[in-house]
Amino acid sequence: MLLHYLKIAFRHIQRHYVISIVNIGGLSIGLTAALLVATYVANEYSYDRFHKQGGRIVKVEFSHDEGDKSYYVPWMSYGFGQAVKDQCPEVASFGRVTDVSFYSKLVESDALHKYYESGFVAADNAFLQLFSFEFIKGNPKTALTRPGTMVLTEKMAAKYFGNKDPVGKIITYDKKHVYEIVGVMKDLPFNSSIQFDFLGDLMSYRANETEEMKGYLNKKQLKEQVSSIGATGSYNTYFLLNHSESKDIVASKIPSLLTSSLRIKDKKDRYELFPLFDLHFERIDKNARQKAVVFSMIGMLILSLALVNYINLTTASSSARAGEVSVRKVVGGQRIALISQFYLESVLYVTIAFTLAIAAFFALKDYFYTSLELRIDASFLTSSWFAFPLIGFYVLSILLSGSYPALLLSKLAPGKILSGSYGKSGNAASVRKVFTVFQFTVSISLIIGSVLIAKQMQLFHSKELGIDRDRIVTVFLDHEDGLSKHYQEIRQGMERISGVESVTSSSLLMYHPYGNIWELKRSDSNKKLSVNSFLVDEQFVKTMRIQWLAGPRKNSRAGIVLNQTAARELGINAGNYNQTLDLGFTTKADVIGIVKDFHFRSLNQKISPMALQMRSDTLFNNYLYIRLSKNADLKHTLSEAENVYNQYRANRAFEYAFLDDTYNKMYISEAKTGYIVYWFTGIAIVIACLGLFGLTTFSAEQRRKEIGIRKVLGATVMNIVTMLSKDFLMLVVISVLLASPIAYVIMKRWLEDFAYHVPISWWVFALAGFTGLLIAVITISFQGFRAAAANPVKSLKSE
């Protein structure tokens, strides 16, 4: 019986090959899109799930609210974890890990293997017991228990030692710290929120940190800092709880552990424990969950469009099979047998489409990963995180695509069919119209979204920022490599290069995610203002082409330059800016001028108070900014700049970047969203067009004799095309009316996440509606002209 049903299904495919190709093509496109999205979404939700104890691991952070602003301190002090464990029986153990440096440092195993690396962290042995990082060599129970020891990842072991066993070998970090290799672990999966290449012992880092503090703290301050268990510190601290439900109890106990001088006095200050499985969404990439939800919805809509296509075309062609169904029922065929047959046909269609979709997925996945800058391990595609969605889509597609056609076709009454009354009911046609409206509503909504995303991305690149980032090259000056102490000589050498307009420096890189917060207050007020701050030299404002509002004071090479926002909140203006501000820690500085507000962060955020600390001492100015002239020969100018740089460098090679590229990197997340929406808008349109083409083909076939009669009576080709088109085009118009308010609400909410965003103009909806109608006209006309051009004699000769 099964073989018989398969034969019938294959014969149906051969007989109606156009509709079959449209069905299979639409399904395979929808399934391919769904698989690509599922890979992205499943990877996002799989972060840190490979840790066996992950369900009981939490990370502690300190939060503070100030007005409408809030910030988190993610690093605890060295003794914080032990103090909490000692007094909280709910805590089973704790582990600490810290970034050794924010900048890349020289790592070498021998004269032939030395590179600048940034993935260097330090941790205690307890960290290895908490997390499930897999060791290839060495013992995780004893690793990092001795000072001067290190664990490498497999990739770094191969890079520095080739095929040799690295255990027992030596690596030198930053030219002065020597480590013995005691273990090698597998490369960390990309879906780990903790990433590193080198894992040094925490004892050595703590000893080096304490030695550095001796350089700027007196004995009393040093003792307080070393023994403190307050929130301030540099250690990411993780607790392993006996029971995951006890995290709120632990958080409530922590404030009582602090010394009286560090105890929380502000009710808005609090400690929060974040479950490990939530870190990726809650702390590392706060937009990740929203993107995953949005992409999931888009993926399911695309798959729904494909399934609707199948159902629409199958039910539309039901009259072609009505005779078959009626005959089988008259000779005693059971309804369950008919349902089984039509379900089997759905299984066949979906299986063919699914096979094509998997082939397309593997052909497109690398391009998909590259476009979205995704990093997904190859092993992820063999994990349950990918297998479950794969199987789920297959089963879901069979059930959804097969249920309605099977139930509809199997209940056809043979009496109505044989009497010729079947097909006159409008119920099935109404369902098809609803499905067609759904398809084009989704497609037009995506077109509106695509246009607005493109406009917002254009705003990012065209908005006046109050700073000229064009033709600026940035170079990292490593003060530990001796470069920043030669800044004046380097700047003078750069300024002599043909093609260089001016040169400046700052402590932090513009448009980079990290920042530096200071608290300022006027000498005649107790009100403190938190400001973002850069250390800069006296040429920064000129080189970056920031506009002065007041000042600068003549012959001033040191002091504070405020932006408009900071000056306004401090009550300072062009008439009274000549005053001194308290920076804390007994430090004071004169205000030497006020500049217009300029964007130093993403346009997601409003301009906040900024203080440029202009200093003649540029030792900690780590970034050089070189403004090139309009007619500069880029290759020659950069080559000359490298020659100047090389005169003073000890180790670090000349590396440069364009400030414009650094700025654009801030919007990678939005660009990824744009890519997804653009691609899936195109896919939705293709699927909707396939469905419309199939329905038009079927409609033309059903009305073949009517068209022949009309042509004999004098109807033109355009009359026939109009007749076939008007009903479908009315459905597209309805789709435009439905899609517009839906897209407006969704995109309004998306745009509200940006402090600066484009308006939602009427022409966006007009453009999307016109595009949808144009696509529908082209699709319908193709088949319409073909049907209208057919010889009427052939369509009427059977009568």
Image (cartoon, rainbow, N blue to C red):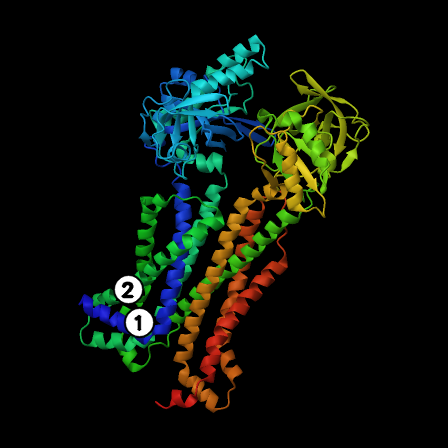
The amino acid pointed to by label 2 is Leu
Determine if residue 403 is in view: no
Residue 411: x, y in percent? 27, 69
Q: Residues within 10 Å of mark 1 (few under 14, many from 20)?
A: some
729 and 176: which is toward the camera: 176
Residue receiving disc 1 = 13
Q: CA distance from mark 2 to mark 1?
A: 10 Å
Residue 496 vertical position relative to residue 798 in the rendered view, above or below: above
Residue 620: x, y in percent? 63, 25
Residue 363 vertical position relative to residue 160 in the rendered view, above or below: below
Residue receiving disc 2 = 348
User: Could you tell whether 371 is left or right of 166 in the image?
Assistant: right
Quarter of the figure that contains the C terminus: bottom left
Residue 545: x, y in percent? 73, 39
Q: Which mark is residue 494?
A: none
- The residue drawn where x is 58% and y is 14% is 215
Determine if residue 489 is in view: yes
Instruction: Identify the secondary structure beneath mark 1.
Output: helix
In the displayed image of the protein, which residue is found farthest to the front?
A: 111
- The residue drawn where x is 33% and y is 25% is 140
In the displayed image of the protein, which residue is found farthest to the top?
A: 220
Quarter of the image holding residue 421?
bottom left
User: Could you tell whether 278 is left or right of 726 in the image?
Assistant: left
Quarter of the image holding residue 329?
bottom left
542 and 325: which is toward the camera: 542
* Residue contact at pointers 2 and 1, CB within 8 angstroms: yes
Residue 681 vertical position relative to residue 54 in the rendered view, above or below: below
Q: Could you tell me how many numbered marks the image carries?
A: 2
The amino acid pointed to by label 1 is Ile
User: Could you tell whether 555 is left or right of 23 in the image?
Assistant: right
- The residue drawn where x is 32% and y is 46% is 382
